[in-house]
Image: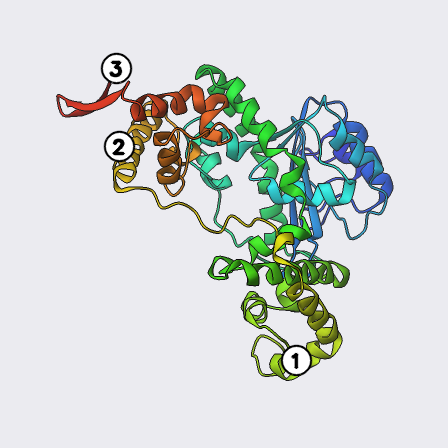
Amino acid sequence: MKPHQTHEEMLWGWRIDMTKLDIVTDEGLAQLCQQLGQHPHIAIDTEFLRERTYYPALALVQIAYPGSEPILIDPLKVRQWAPFFEIMDNPRIVKILHAGRQDLEIFNLKMGKLPRSVFDTQIAAAMCGLGEQISYGALVQKTLGVQLQKSDGYTDWMQRPLTTKQVAYARDDVRYLIAAYEELCKRSQRLGRQAWLDEEMAESMDPSIYASDPDQAWSRVKKWSSLPDRDLVVLQALARWRELRARALDKPIRFVVSDEGMISVARMKHVTLEDLKARRSFTRLSLSSFADDLMAVHEKARKIPKDQWPVFHTKTRIPSEESDLVAELAWALLHLIARDSEISTSRLVTKKDLPSLVDQLVRGKDVSSHPLFHGWRYTMAGSKVEDLVHGRLSLTVLKGKVVQVT
């Protein structure tokens, strides 16, 4: 046994060669999962490609457990994932990820459901005043004082063998994650924000976030708001068709029809093959495979009567000048609260949302569905915005500092 190897590394052959992947067989993964099941928390990361596919192509899984070195799993070799999925579904084991939304999307696709007991260090860092959407490198530096070497993560993770630099980069992605998690737990408890952190984690695990509804695909088309409702009805049908076709082909939606093409076709009252050929958004090669379907979808959508149109909420009320002024005061108040609470203002509400939100408050409308007005955000800031709008709180300058007056 080499001096630096643990018993498990010698038994299972992990990291004998630092340039190679560790788990490349179903048996190896099953043995690893037996070990993972003995720990209260594990660190996880993934590498994937999706530039030329609709669904992300999983290229690598990185794992670490307390006391272990990073372990790399090769999904191009492993076939039996049931033991791993059991670990991911085990509520007694905390799964630690950083900015894990895309990782969770992959696991949701592979497992048919989301993992349980997930802790996202990026969310926790924001709640602990370390910055909104902090990078993994910055998190490690701020919590542990470790400066990671800069490297290019945007490489071809599907190639085999991986380069020595790729392997080192992948291992570092989970090497410090458990220690950062432990430090964030201490900070959240010290700040008295554990309940708020739990609330944020629960919201991030809402299954609807990871479900791509074809009927809502129109809202993800660039410049959709430039269309009147009549054309939006057509765009909704076209976007649904494009989404389902992209899934069937496992190609990015832009490979089917670009957003620019979707908008231009949605504006047309009638569509012919010549119309499509005349537009740069379509190629003759791709048109031959879907032109008839696209034209049929367009024609059917144009015939939908007005009383059957969905409500798009494309027209929003422009706040009054007075409401805009109150919104500026509310933004200053939120900055003050966020500063004193060591949290990012955008974690409370975006400045873009605030004028409309304040306008609704001024007019006595129900705003309880907005995140600022329930949960920990309401406790910290939403209630004070209400007080400001209704004259129960004001801002003034005292000895050169902005302070609240009640």
Residue placed most toward the observer, 273 or 261: 273
What residue is pinned by disc 2?
329
In the rendered view, does 54 fall on the left or right side of 80? left
Residue placed most toward the observer, 37 or 264: 264
Per the image, label 2 sits on a secondary structure element best described as helix
Residue placed most toward the observer, 169 or 240: 240
- Residue 251 is situated, as x and y percent measured from the top left of the image, at 70, 63
Residue type at mark 3: give it. Thr
- Tell me the residue at 33%/25% (across/down): 337
Are the residues tagged 2 and 3 within 8 Å (C-beta)? Answer: no
Q: How is the image coloured?
A: rainbow
Query: Considering the image in quadrants, where does the C terminus appear?
Result: top left
- First in sequence, mark 2 or 3: give its number: 2
Q: Is residue 183 visible?
A: no
Q: Is residue 295 above or below residue 317?
A: below
The circle on residue 406 is 3
- Tell me the residue at 51%/52% (across/down): 151
- Residue 304 is situated, as x and y percent measured from the top left of the image, at 66, 60
Query: For residue 262, which quarter of the picture?
Result: bottom right
- Residue 369 is situated, as x and y percent measured from the top left of the image, at 51, 30
Q: Is residue 404 above or below residue 257?
A: above
